[in-house]
Image (tube, rainbow, N blue to C red):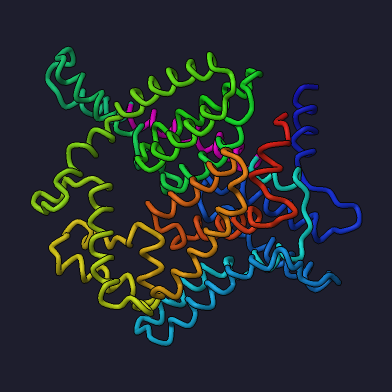
């Protein structure tokens, strides 16, 4: 009976529209895609494609005109057009076309949402399914980490003379622990994208009181997940989010208690081994000696440095979407940034990446989108925390390079920009979590 009850509850999460089968399948395709998003990009791709096709069909079936208040969504197609025009002065047409193909959702989803009328509960379910996918991915990653950790500990013990040697045990334990931190803990997708998904889900879970055991367990798992992913950018965003929520508490005693909890939490997070690694190596930013031991944060700073130097040489139109990365990689070689050159890193900052690709023209469109988003989401601290999550994510990662980030931003930001159903206000503020 319990199993059948759970199945009924789960089936009730899906979208149902008695008069419009196209919209029913459209939203349910998006729900399944968001469920599978934390499990790798290949799994949700067919469902995103299905939703694009059905959304296009809905446009032709709709007899409504474009809603004037939502015309700002057309900035996304404009951004795509600017990228397309950069092919004119791009030599590497093949890479440029590949990027355009991955970026098609930036053009299609915002146009589709101009003709889709959604309510608060419909949009909220996107995050419910994303949350379920995150919980599943956490336990998959945790199981893989345990298996890899036990395997390496056994292997090291087998090759040592004495199992009882304390140094052998300590080294094997530390090597096994590495599978629980950072990139090693996230084998399904890039930790930066996982961190973004987790932070957005936390943004509305933290708004509500942890008055049920289920909520408390879920929030604990998400915090643990963030800790193990070891993203310094995610730690920064989480700190800002927490402070915004704490300052919003009216009860002074509760506010003081939460501040103490915040500082204790900071101590725990800052003691993450990967964060100490960041402290010790990023300070020698200009030193390229022993570069193979560099941290990802130091590599990111060097990527920014090389990108700024290139932008100064071609600020107006950039280098075109096909050539931007090639020229950046050559700049790494010229500057002696061997680690970045060998790993063919992009700019690790979407605003720099866009400027490299399309110059200040493309950057102007991208910045305009976020200025309008900030205006729409300035009404509460919780809304503003959602804006900060998206904004800071683009500062620390080129999110619109991989399909994981492109398709996510092309859906979430248009929904946030829509006046009729602003995700951060109506979903986060008014809809209770069951």
* Figure quadrant of residue 113: bottom right
Q: Where is residue 249 shown, x and y percent of the image?
A: 57, 25
The location of residue 130, given as percent across then percent down, is 60, 42
> Can residue 47 be seen in this snapshot?
no
Q: x, y percentage for residue 164?
A: 17, 12
* Residue 31 image point, x, y percent: 68, 48
In the orientation shown, which residue stands out farthest toward the left? 289
Q: Which residues are magenta?
A: 128-149
Of the pair 169 and 289, the residue shown nearer to us? 289
144 in the magenta segment = yes
Q: Is residue 329 above or below residue 395?
A: below
Q: Is residue 427 among what the camera can see?
A: yes
Whether residue 269 is situated above or below residue 407 in the rendered picture: above
Q: Is residue 389 above or below residue 399?
A: above
Residue 101 colored in magenta in the image = no
Q: Residue at x 77, y 53 (%)?
A: 118
| Residue that appears at 26% across and 23% down | 173
């Amino acid at each position: 009976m319990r199993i059948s009850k759970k199945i009924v509850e789960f089936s009730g999460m899906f979208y149902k529209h008695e008069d419009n089968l196209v919209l029913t399948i459209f939203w349910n395709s998006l729900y399944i895609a968001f469920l599978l998003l934390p499990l790798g990009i290949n799994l949700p791709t067919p469902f995103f494609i299905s939703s694009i096709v059905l959304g296009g069909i809905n446009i032709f079936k709709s007899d409504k005109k474009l809603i004037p208040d939502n015309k700002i969504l057309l900035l996304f197609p404009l951004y795509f057009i600017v990228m397309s025009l950069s092919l004119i002065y791009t030599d590497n047409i093949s890479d440029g076309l590949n990027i355009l193909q991955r970026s098609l959702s930036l053009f299609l989803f915002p146009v589709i949402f101009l003709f889709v009328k959604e309510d608060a509960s419909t949009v909220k379910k996107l995050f419910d399914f994303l949350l379920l996918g995150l919980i599943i991915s956490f336990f998959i990653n945790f199981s893989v980490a345990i298996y890899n950790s036990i395997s390496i500990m056994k292997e090291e013990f087998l090759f040592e003379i004495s199992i009882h040697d304390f140094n052998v045990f300590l080294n094997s334990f530390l090597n096994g622990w590495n599978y629980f931190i950072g990139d090693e803990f996230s084998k399904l997708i890039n930790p930066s994208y996982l961190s973004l998904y987790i932070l957005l889900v936390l943004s509305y879970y933290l708004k509500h009181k942890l008055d049920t055991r289920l909520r408390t367990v879920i929030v604990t798992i998400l915090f643990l997940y963030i800790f193990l992913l070891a993203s310094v950018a995610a730690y920064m965003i989480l700190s800002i989010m927490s402070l915004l929520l704490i300052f919003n508490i009216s009860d002074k005693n509760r506010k003081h208690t939460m501040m103490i909890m915040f500082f204790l939490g900071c101590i725990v997070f800052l003691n993450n081994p990967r964060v100490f690694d960041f402290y010790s190596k990023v300070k020698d930013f200009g030193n390229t000696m022993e570069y193979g031991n560099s941290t990802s944060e130091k590599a990111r700073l060097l990527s920014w440095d090389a990108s700024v130097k290139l932008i100064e040489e071609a600020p107006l139109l950039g280098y075109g979407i096909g050539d931007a990365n090639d020229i950046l990689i050559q700049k790494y070689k010229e500057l002696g940034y061997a680690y970045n050159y060998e790993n063919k890193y992009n700019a690790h900052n979407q605003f720099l990446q866009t400027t490299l690709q399309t110059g200040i023209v493309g950057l102007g469109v991208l910045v305009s989108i976020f200025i309008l988003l900030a205006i729409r989401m300035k009404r509460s601290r919780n809304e503003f925390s959602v804006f900060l999550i998206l904004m800071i994510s683009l500062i620390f990662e080129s999110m619109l390079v991989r399909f994981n980030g492109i398709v996510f931003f092309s859906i979430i930001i248009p929904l946030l920009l829509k006046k009729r159903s602003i995700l951060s206000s109506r979903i986060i503020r008014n809809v209770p979590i069951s």
